[in-house]
Each structure stands twice: as C-alpha cells, then as structure tokens.
Amino acid sequence: MRDGSGGGVRAGGRVAVLALLWGSTFLWIDLALEGFSPVQITFVRCALGAALLLVLARRAGVRLPRGRKAVGRLLVAAFLCNTLPFALFSLGQQSVDSGVAGVLNATTPLWSLLIGLVAGERGALGGRRLAGLATGFAGTVLIFAPWQPGALAGWGALALLGAAVSYALAFAWMGRMPAGQGVPAIGLSAAQLTAATVLAALLLPWGGPPPEAPGTVPVLALLVLGIFATGVTFHLTYRTILAEGPTQAAAVGYLLPVVSVLLGAVVLGERVGWRVVAGMAVVLAGVVLTRWGPKAPAGDDGERPEPLPAR
C-alpha cells in the first residue's frame, strides 16, 4: 500500500527543486552576461535545452508534432514563451539586478489576467480578483518607485516587464491554440525549444561579435542555464502538472522571486532594499488574490496555464 504522505513529500520535493531551478535562472543569466551577449545567451540556452529534451524524447520513443498547422502554432508559442522573453531577460539584466528580475517575472499572472479582461473572456473576475490585480500592480509601482531620484524605470526594467507580458501572451495563445493533441508533453516541449532555437539563430547576426575569451564562469553559467534551468525545468514542470495538476505547479511561481532575491544577495552581493522586499510581498499577495476568485466555467481559463508548451 502506498503512503499518501509519501506522495505529498515527493510532490513537495519536486516543487522545491523546480523553485530552485527557476529562481536560479536570473543568477545564471547575470553570470553569463560577463562573457556573452544577450542574443548569444538566448540562442545557446534554447539550443542546450532543446538538445536535452530531444534526447529524452528519443529515449522515450516519442515523436515530435508534425503537420504545417502544428508547426505554425509551435513557432508562435516558441517566440512568445521562449525566444522573446529569454532575450528580454538577458537584455534587462544588463542594467537590473537578478533579484529584481525574478520579482518582476512574478507579475506574469497579473498580466495574464489583464489580457483576459481586455479580451472579454466570459470567466467571472469577481471583486477579489480585481482587488488582486490592483494590489499586484501597486506592488510593481512600489518596486519602480517613479517618485524617487534614481528610480528603477530604465529600459532594462521595461524589458523585464516586457518578458512577463510575453509570457502572459503565450498563456493566452497556448490555452486557445494547442500545438499538438495526443503528443506527450516531452515531445511538445522538445519541439517548442527546437523551434525557439531556430528563431534565436535568426537574431545571431545582430547579437554582437563571437566572444574571444568568455572565461570559465560565464561558460559554466550558460551550460547550467541551458541544461538545468531550461531543459530540466521544462521536463520537471510537465511531470508536476501531470502528477499533481497545474495548481501545484503554480505554487512554484510564489517561491521563484524569493529564491532569485536570496541568490542575488548571497551569491552576487546584490543589495536588497526594503522597496524590493515590500514590492515582492505586495505583488505575491496580489497574485494570491487573483487565484482566489470564483472558478470560471468550463472552457474559460480562470487560472491561466503556466509558461510552458500546451499539453
């Protein structure tokens, strides 16, 4: 007989590993930027993640999605969910701390809800969700602090917010336009990262000259970013969604900014101001409120899917 508590421990351990991998993404980007350009980081990250997932898919005997329509949908999903946000995160972190990048990434569910509201979705928002939306964006304003000299309002911070918006647009697209029904998750994720690699390769001519001597730390950081924080994370997230459902996987989003802030402070020596901590708390409180709203009718996503390929 299986012990239910054992399953809970395994689920909690998987979520903890996911939070560490996802939250460390911004640390590895920061270190990789010491030797590579944002476009180069985006391409190598996608390529390494795709290579790992293609190997796993082949070992599992899983075929990738086929057909013009499926490939077209995957290309759009890859651009919105991988190529564009990966590039924007790397661009933004040239001038913004890794911890702040993780906190701004946590605004993704708020943008997702706002996009659904603008699109006129039939799902009931309710007072709590509207309050959560307002609370979350108030936390974002607190982080930016436009009323203070030297406020965090440059192009780098805007690029990071753009990455969060891109994820939200990807949610809407993947929720309505599944890329390949009947294809196992590992096949979809491998195909999507492969498509993202192709799109990122198109940007390489504008990505700066090849690095002459990037150094050991940037190279190792890029390897970890591509293999573990991208490829392994995609695979583990799918396993979490399939085993425990999207709500359990969504819990990672609450831990991610905390991990990114802690790693930035401990490893990179980033200064964690009270505004970042307070803003993070307010943003997460807003996200929690948006998820407490009334459930949407079948077919209307009250809770947006996570930033992953459609199942």
Image (cartoon, grey):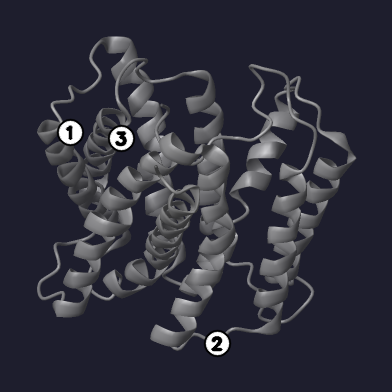
Observer-side mark, 1 or 3, equals 1
Give the percent coordinates (x, y) of residue 264.
Answer: 46, 79
Of marks 1 and 3, which one's residue comes earlier in the chain?
1
User: In the drawing, does residue 50 fall left or right of residue 167?
Assistant: left
Three-letter amino acid code of the residue under disc 2: Arg
Give the percent coordinates (x, y) of residue 188.
Answer: 30, 29
Badge number at residue 57? 1
Could you tell me which secondary element the residue under label 3 belongs to?
helix
Observer-side mark, 3 or 2, equals 3
Cα–Cα span, label 3 and label 2: 36 Å
Residue identifier under label 3:
189
Of the pair 163 and 203, the residue shown nearer to us: 163
- Verify CB contact (< 8 Å) between mark 1 and mark 3: no
Q: Quadrant of residue 33?
A: bottom left
Q: Is residue 158 visible?
A: no
- Verify CB contact (< 8 Å) between mark 3 and mark 2: no
Of marks 2 and 1, which one's residue comes earlier in the chain?
1
- Verify CB contact (< 8 Å) between mark 2 and mark 1: no
Observer-side mark, 2 or 1, equals 1
Q: Residues within 10 Å of mark 2 (few under 14, many from 20)?
A: few
Of the pair 211 and 13, the residue shown nearer to us: 13
* Residue drawn at point x = 20 percent, y = 41 percent: 53
Q: Residues within 10 Å of mark 1 (few under 14, many from 20)?
A: many
Three-letter amino acid code of the residue under disc 3: Ser
* Residue drawn at point x = 44 percent, y = 49 percent: 3
Q: Quadrant of the N terminus?
A: top left
196 in relation to 288, above or below: above
Cα–Cα span, label 1 and label 3: 9 Å
